[in-house]
Image (cartoon, rainbow, N blue to C red):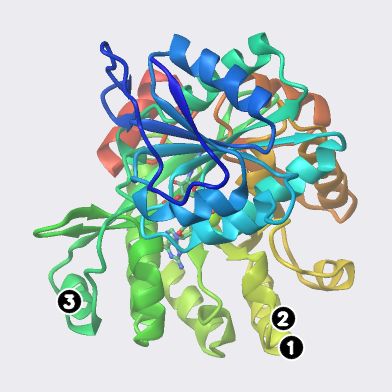
Amino acid sequence: MHTTINEPSSSTAAAERKGPQHRGAQVNGLAAIDMIHIIDDNPVVIQSLAEIITRIELPSTGYLSGRQFIENIGAIKPNALVILDLDMPYIDGIQVMRHLAILDAPPLLILMNEGDPSILNAAEKLGQAHNLEVVASLTKPLLSSNVFRTFKQALSRLKPRQDDTKKDQSQPYIGDRNSLMRALEEDQFELHYQPQVTISGRRLSGIEALIRWNHPTHGLIYPNKFLPIVENNGLIDEVTAWVLENATKQAARFNSEGIKVSVSVNVSAINIRALTFPEQLSNMLTSYNMAPSNLMLEVTESALMGELTTSLDILTRIRLRGIRLSIDDFGTGYSSLQQLHRAPFSELKIDRSFVSNISHDAEARSIVKICTMLGHELGMSTIAEGVEDQNTLSILADIGCDIAQGYLIASPMPVDSLCEWARKNHLAA
Ligand code: C2E
Ligand code: MG
Ligand code: MG
């Protein structure tokens, strides 16, 4: 198997050569990479990467400039992986990322750079902001053992996990106001619950309710796909009321099965601008006989932006009623220390984008450490979301974070499975 390096002068479509025994990289049969595109102005780098790629039986194509890649970008297939050097003359890696971001089905990305690691870090974040999937980063000069390990890690990240994580991100747009109203009327929504456990004692401390739309023809649809449509069509009050009511009802069931936990419910920015929201919450808790301290509302940091005075008024009145508040996705918004100090939060939930990187990224580790200290100083408990491996959990324990949530502990699951899970893990009272 050989790698084709496209000559800089050539403007023809990127040539591919597949070796006779090419099989593609089947990762648990789910993700298949059928071509690796290497973009680097140094032919030696392309050649050495191509040799390593040959060892994993994949075909590759090389490009000696960003321009040359962009000229051929139409030929990039969805199952491709692009290895991109950041520092190139004329058109650099950041400019190439901009072109990748507007593709309908962008390829997976591995970034490469020499020198200051914070540049690779910033480029990774930029990729995420463009909705590109940056699966790994490589620091030059490349050591073949390093590169090989990075590939293996990158491919293993594509592994399917437990059922709830099989999200089809390519799901087409399927919701409009009418179909969402029907979903409410016909009870097509359901809640999955994800456990939250104390890091020191591995005690079940809470569960987060996450909404799913069980669509009659499209199957299970995840919230990021339909909540924006819910919000834009004036239906978020109804949907939040549905979630709260069902989470409260099911919490009563957990209690009766011996699972004594608090239930976290996500609320949208629109909910915390509605002046009657605190009363609605109190009425609902009374009718289902639930202690207010067993309900935690998760408000994302970005939801606090905008009409802060109204939100602070409502959040304070919610807190006065004894309901607890968590600041979700912390670190991704722009809340000032003063806002954080003024808002009556009980819990600080550190965003997954930092947590999932703490085992290999010193900056992410510092951020999680600082968020934990900040939360504790302001009298909040701290929870890390997106805990996927044991190493991350051990680092969180060293940092002193209180609670963990993530696939390592359990994926979100339907209510029956949660009761079963708690019993199996001896977490039911
Ligand atoms: P979130 O509140 O930050 O919820 C955490 C998301 O991370 C969930 O995605 C969960 O399935 C996923 N997750 C949990 N553990 C891991 C892990 O270890 N690794 C990774 N990669 N992901 C993990 P989901 O359920 O798709 O929800 C996405 C977002 O939708 C939620 O983010 C929340 O902001 C919103 N959402 C979910 N349910 C509701 C709801 O009932 N009402 C409102 N307003 N928003 C909701
Ligand atoms: Mg949440
Ligand atoms: Mg979150």
The residue tagged 2 is: 312
Which of labels 3 and 1 is toward the front? 3
Residue 74 image-quadrant placement: bottom left
The residue tagged 1 is: 309
Q: In the shown orientation, is residue 370 left or right of residue 51?
A: right
Residue 28 image-quadrant placement: top left
Q: Nearer the viewer, residue 96 or 283?
A: 96
Q: Residue at x 64, y 62 (%)?
A: 325
Q: Nearer the viewer, residue 98 or 228?
A: 98
Mark 2 to mark 1: distance in Å?
A: 5 Å
| Number of numbered tags placed on the structure image | 3
Indicate the position of residue 75 as horizontal and vertical percent values: 35, 49
The residue tagged 3 is: 179
Nearest to N terminus: mark 3 or mark 1: 3
Q: Are marks 2 and 1 in contact (CB under 8 Å)?
A: yes
Mark 3 to mark 1: distance in Å?
A: 35 Å
- Disc 3 marks which amino acid? Ser
Q: Residue at x 68, y 38 (%)?
A: 41
Q: Residue at x 15, y 76 (%)?
A: 182
Callout 2: few (<14), some (14-19), or many (20+) C-alpha neighbours within 10 Å?
A: some
